Image (cartoon, helix red, strand yellow):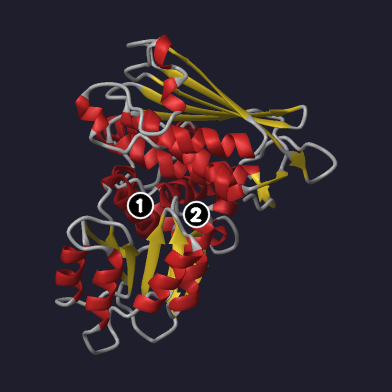
Amino acid sequence: ELFSETINLVSFFNEINELCGVRAMSKGLKFCYQAAPNLPTSISIDGKRLRQICINLLSNAVKFTSQGTVQLGVTYSDNTLELTVKDDGVGIPQELHREVFKPFIQTGSSDYKVQGTGLGLAITSGLVEIMGGNITLDSAPNQGSLFTVQIPAIVVVDSQIPVVDNTAITCSIIGYNRLDQSSAQLRALVVDDMVENCLVMRSLLEQLNFAVTLAADGVQAVQLATNEPFDVIFMDLVMPNMDGLTATRRIMEYPGRSNTIILATTARAYPEDQAASLEAGCRDYLSKPVARDRLLQLLVKYLPIEWVYAENLYTSNVTSVLSPEETASTLNAEQSQQLLDIIRLGAVKDVISNLETLLQAPNCPTQAKYLLELARDFKLSSLRSALKANISCGCEQMH
């Protein structure tokens, strides 16, 4: 069943870019995102299903690529949104091009097959079909794969506006202020048996200045939660050894205020799953793939916090972030712009390489070391904010 909504394409794909970029970089791959310059600002489409299609195809590309690049392209014309996902992976023989869209069909060696159920492309194909679109595959063994998806979509506004970089707006929340008089860093426990899901959640939360602990199943979650306090727990419902519902009940058996804010994370999100999670003790639920906006809504709803926005970095408060004494130790505007351009391509490894080279140079700005730490931890929002602050300061000094 489809539920159309208005989505901002720039915000939507910036989020997809960041989520999948983390997965690719964690595997040592280069991730590139390219949007056509004439994308409309907003379209009417089922955003949840579109997100699922993107995540499924990109996750599949990362899974079957051991080295090289994964690319996401987005264009719009004739009331049609077109997505292309290209990889340098193992490729698919011509005779299997139709078969891969059937349930439980997997290609490649056994090393790849043990990583999933063989349902990803079947689900993706089904979603594209019910949305009135089509999906095609161009691939050959050892030459990578190219999936092309075309889905009908209506522009919400009358005119098409060229894409602008509004990353500072869509990813502008960079931290929080506590409202309970405490100065302690908020702690989150992420419970999921899929390493990629854990890495994505950790990246999202660390960008917001949360301290993050990971658990691979319900058994580990119960052990951790009964020995140390967490401000919020993200609990996957389907896991080996002990499922999320059982783990939630065990944690809720322990008295005290700590560890009572548990948010279920599920890829199914059927009404019965939501009801079961609430009955077990979860406060709310997040559908997977996790949408950043939904995560932000739930965190501010259940925790005593208010968000800190990055806009403060570019306006009158810029000197409070970069004092005159520190300005001389920051990257200049040109250096910062070069790094920003690389980040927009999703090439975090190239950012790291550039900063490492810069650190070897004489009179290297002291900020480079801090920026390198952000890049290595995939804290892309904080990295972008710092670089844009440098550019803003540079422009003010020129005037």
Disc 2 crowd rating (10 Å Cα; few below 14, some 14-19, many 20+) is some
Q: Is residue 317 visible?
A: yes
Q: Nearer the viewer, residue 312 or 239?
A: 239
Q: Position of residue 128 (x, y in %)?
A: 59, 35
Residue at x-position 40% and y-position 86%:
180
User: Where on the picture, by quarter, is residue 348?
Assistant: top left
- Which residue in the rendered view is the most extreme toward the right? 158
Point 48% across, 38% down: residue: 123
The image position of residue 146, as x and y in percent, is: 48, 19
Q: Residue at x 33, y 60 (%)?
A: 236
Does label 1 or label 2 sit earlier along the sequence? Answer: 1
Type of amino acid under label 2: Ala
Q: Is residue 16 above or below residue 310?
A: above
Q: Which mark is residue 203?
A: 1
- State left or right for residue 173 relative to residue 96: right
Identify whether 115 is placed above or below 145: below
Asked whether disc 1 touches disc 2, contact meaning CB atoms under 8 Å apart, the reply is no
Q: Residue 392, position in %: x, y?
A: 56, 48
Query: Is 359 on the left or on the right of 55, as rendered?
Result: left
- Choose between 71 and 254: the one closer to the eye: 254
Cα distance in 3D space between marks 1 and 2: 13 Å
Residue 29 place in picture, x, y as percent: 32, 29
Kind of residue at disc 1:
Ser
Q: Mark 2 sits on what residue? A: 291
- Between label 1 and label 2, give the one nearer the viewer: 2
Depth check: 314 or 209 in front? 209
Report the side of 238 relative to 124 (left or right): left
Judge whether residue 343 can be spotted in this image.
no
Q: Indicate which disc residue 159 carries.
A: none
SS for dot 1: helix
Identify the element where label 2 is drawn: loop
